[in-house]
Amino acid sequence: MWMDQDKLLETAKEVLKHNDRGGWTVPAGQLYPHQWLWDSCFIAIGLRHFNVERAKTELLSLLRGQWSNGMLPNIIFLDDKEYKGHRNLWRSWVSPYAPKDVTTSGITQPPMLAEAVVAVGEKLSEAKRHQWYEDIYPHLLRYHEWLYVERNPHQEGLIVLLHPYECGLDNSPTWISELRKHSMPWWILAIEQLHLDGLVNLVRRDTRHIPPGQRMSNIEAMAYWAAVRRLRRKAYNSEAILSRSLFLVEDLVFNCILIRANQQLKKIAASLGRTLPDNLLAAMDKTEQALEELWDNSSGQYFSRSFVSHKLIEEPTIATLLALYSGAIPKAKAKLLIDLLKDRNAFATTWPVPSVPLNSAFFDPVKYWQGPTWVNINWLIIKGLENYGFSGDAAKLRRQTLELVARGGMNEYFNPLTGQAVGAPTFSWTAALTIDLLKT
């Protein structure tokens, strides 16, 4: 396909300008009116190419939501009256660690901040980079320490997530299967059996903007809201939640991103002449070692694992390919993942990479994280391919991703079979990472 790269670049810039709210950027207008953690990280990676100071501001704005225990929340809420219901759902103020001047969620999201900080630093002079790292380092260190103190209860190295929203791939089959097994409230099952779930559309915001078939189901949405209430009742106290809940996952995507983030944190510390605490370094090493415990020989894939049963959750998803981004797996296994990427029964769709493989019972080409192609995940896979020296495969996926966006627009996600743009239009991380793929 012929592609006007200059036009694509300008369109992407216009999307970011449209979604700019001054010190931070919304993911997509009315549908996502607040600030999200990993969205802002991806956005800064794109912004750095034409406005590095604005990219810095994007990341610094995340720090206003940091809790006193070090946690970085996945959402910082607008203070408008219109969104009082959003703030009341989470009620971050029930935790003594929540910030007093802003309202946030009570959970985190994939730790992309270190990657974004280094990416922005690449666009600065040596002196300005040093100051940039100085400004961010204490916050970043506290966040990584919080992850290992609060979410690594058995010191095994793999971070435990308390809610699907923390993994970023909200309704991924991994989490839906665990939800069905361990944490489906009776009243939601009753609503499902009586076929009354359609009433939920009366209170859902997302299905007012996006066709219901492109979002998670009403049953899934209710179950996730119920899970938030359980966390809130325990004041987001990780120890209390971990001691009772059955809905806990050592998530593959999160831990792969963390491994890469740990390497970037080490890079920042070395640049500043700092030494990371010994206990943190030891925990980081354990994470890399523990990743291999998530490998399944029979299928040749990595999976997430149930924290409670310690068994792999054998639902194939795009998460296995994120092991490439971690940079911590043996090259022999990386080659097996490349084979999976090229398998026409798995991930080799016309417009790759689908969020679940074609041979999954969950596959639906337009349903949120159960089939569509996402530019941010393609970007992570491209980085992983490059890190392992698969430059040809990386270049091909880069070209296909840019052609997909040029053809379909700056949407939230895309049908991997047809290239149809679905989800929210004018989506910020799609625009930002399009810029990065064009400029790097």
Image: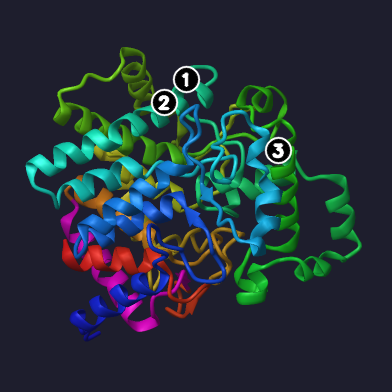
Residue type beneath disc 2: Ala
Quadrant, the C terminus: bottom left
Main SS, magenta region, reads helix
Q: Residue at x 33, y 61 (%)?
A: 342
Residue type beneath disc 3: Arg
Q: Residue at x 72, y 50 (%)?
A: 225
Residue 253 seen anywhere in this rendered image of the structure = no
Quadrant, the N terminus: bottom left
Q: Disc 1 designates what residue?
A: 156
Residue 374 seen anywhere in this rendered image of the structure = yes
Q: Disc 2 designates what residue?
A: 290
Q: Earlier in the sequence, mark 3 or mark 1?
A: 1
Q: Disc 3 designates what residue?
A: 232
**Residue situated furthest left in the rendering:** 126
Is the C-beta separation of discs 3 and 2 under 8 Å? no
In the displayed structure, 297 sits above or below 434; it is above
Tag 3: Cα neighbours inside 10 Å, few (<14), some, or many (≥20)?
Answer: many
Residue type beneath disc 1: Glu
Q: Earlier in the sequence, mark 3 or mark 2?
A: 3
The mark closer to the camera, 3 or 1, is 3
Residue range highlighted in magenta: 390-414
Question: Image quadrant of residue 263?
Answer: top left
**Residue situated furthest front in the rendering:** 101
Q: Is residue 331 left or right of residue 95?
A: left
Marks 3 and 1, how far apart at CA: 26 Å
Q: Tell how many labels.
A: 3
Question: Image quadrant of residue 410?
Answer: bottom left
In the displayed structure, 272 sits above or below 27; it is above
